[in-house]
Image: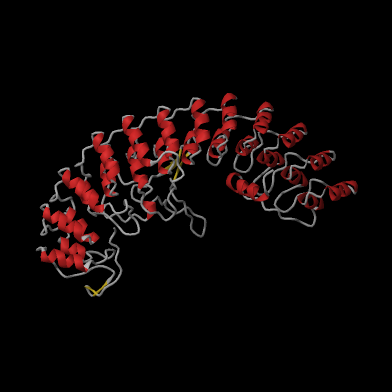
Amino acid sequence: MKSLAHLLCTAAFVGGLVLPAAAADAPVADAAQEADLTTVLALIGQGADVNVSQGDGMTAMHWAAFHDDLELARALLSVRADVDRGTRVGGLQPLWMAATNGSAEMIRVLVDAGANVNAANGTGATPLMAAAMSGSVDAVVLLLDEGAFANARETANGQTPLMFAAWEDRADVIRLLIDRGAHVGLTSWVVSMAEQQYDSDGNLLPTRRPRAPGGNSVMGGMTALLFAARDGHLAAVEALVEGGVNVDQVAGSEGSSPMVIAIANGHYTVAKYLLDAGADPNVENVDGLAPLYATINMRFAPVSWAPNPRTDQERVDAVTLVAALLDAGADPDARIARGLWFSPTSHNRLWINPAGATPFWRAAQASDVESMRLLLRAGADPHLATTDGTTPLMVASGIGWRGNFSQNALGAWMDAVRFLVELGADVTASDRSGYTALHGAAALGDNEMVEYLVSHGAGVDAIDRRGNSPADMAFGPSRFFIPKPKTVELLVRLGSPFQDKCRSDQCVDGKFFGGASTTPR
């Protein structure tokens, strides 16, 4: 039987929070709350009304179902306890409590007493949805046999019993529901992400939409498979695939495939299973994000306000998945259309626009030589730049890098730069902002990289569109850059123009007096 905490959390999600608020004028409910059968029987003998509820609407019958106390339930039913009464908060019926517990016996008792198997709670969720979450095949069978709707939708998000089973990883229930007519292709509602606000008089204020770059205006449109893939529930995914689900059906909001959603949440094992089941490795979402880029991006995912998904528990690692995707025909040169919507939620500090980036570009950005080699063998073009002209060598050299945000392969900065230069990367190329690879190395404060690039023809006198030379980049061209005095000295000695004006937060009146260092190694 579920704990009270579990039941309350479930109620909060699908029907509103129910609080066990005792009231002096509900003695039978109070006794039932404590599972005190002796007191309940004594009160019944005194003629007490068994249907009087506590402050939140909980009756003795609710508590009997909650405790899965069949003897108490039968005693209450013998004096006409109401089996369909909903709570004041959440609109939960006793049958919902029994279904949440997955108690087929209690469900049988309540249904025999006339309980409505399709009675919905405050958000339209039905007992079958609760039973599906519980994982009890017996409870689900009983409800279906009694006429529960296999494709019912709750009204808040349009989710079905199959979706509830999927996000709780209830594989046996999934198989049963599909066998009994559950539609595997149904989706949850697609809803607007517009933020509705009201003034003090209750009048609707102008709509506010997400301000994040690349943010989507709608969300939802989730299938049962997408729920299972998002949460890494391999058993549920297997059951759905066996049941004939379309492995490429995308989310109705931002168009992500089950494989992309699995990868973006760190579930490589699920993604590999879907690939082996025939999923198309080139399905892109509205951001242009396909599985290959998603995998390389997740391997060294930017730091987020919330913890990034863990991948160390996966049976399939990122490199294995990259190789499998390429073997299955993934396009090594597919480009993203814009910055990924979930990167801005990670306090994006890249200072460059990644639109048009390829998987190889993203691997270069992370100093991921291993992935670059795999992509190169599959035919990737190592010189493709973004729409702004930012090349793989530029990001490998530090263009766009930001401390406390970017993640790179440990100790691999110079390995990545050498690898790209040896492939013929143009060390003098500049992007739309005028940045060169040397500007990036200067911003990093990596003197070894500076000397290497200069020795291969990088121009120390290159000036970006804001008027900054490599030496200026090393000295803090804007507030979030930390000055690298030793790199400034090196670049000036090599002939780089220098304005001697620091604009970093680390400086006072344009002068640097020493402070923190974030040069990555």
Q: Nearer the viewer, residue 329 or 321?
A: 321
Q: Where's residue 175, x and y in %?
A: 57, 28
Residue 496 vs 91, above or below: the answer is below
Residue at 80%, 51% (x, y): give it.
31
Where residue 165 sits in the image (x, y, percent)? Answer: 57, 36
Which part of the image, by quadrant, shows the N terminus? top right
Q: Can residue 176 be seen in this view?
A: yes
Horizontal side of residue 490 vs 377, given as left or right: left
In this picture, residue 232 sits left or right of residue 293: right
Q: Where is residue 183 in the image (x, y as percent from the top left)?
A: 53, 27
Q: Which residue is drawn at 24% across and 37% down?
A: 376
Q: Residue furthest right?
A: 46
Please identify the quarter of the rendering in which residue 162 is found: top right
At x 33% / y 35%, what residue is drawn? Answer: 323
| Above or below 473: residue 514 | below
Q: Looking at this view, is 54 or 268 the one in front? A: 268
Which of these two is toward me, 352 or 172? 172
Residue shown at 10%/52% (left/top)? 457
Residue 337 in view in this figure: no
- Note whether 234 is above or below 387 in the view shown: above
Which quadrant: the C terminus?
bottom left
Q: Find residue 332 and report its image quarter.
A: top left
Rendering colour mode: secondary structure
The percent position of residue 108, horizontal first and vertical second, equals: 74, 33
Q: Is 498 situated above or below 271?
A: below
Q: How many marks?
A: 0
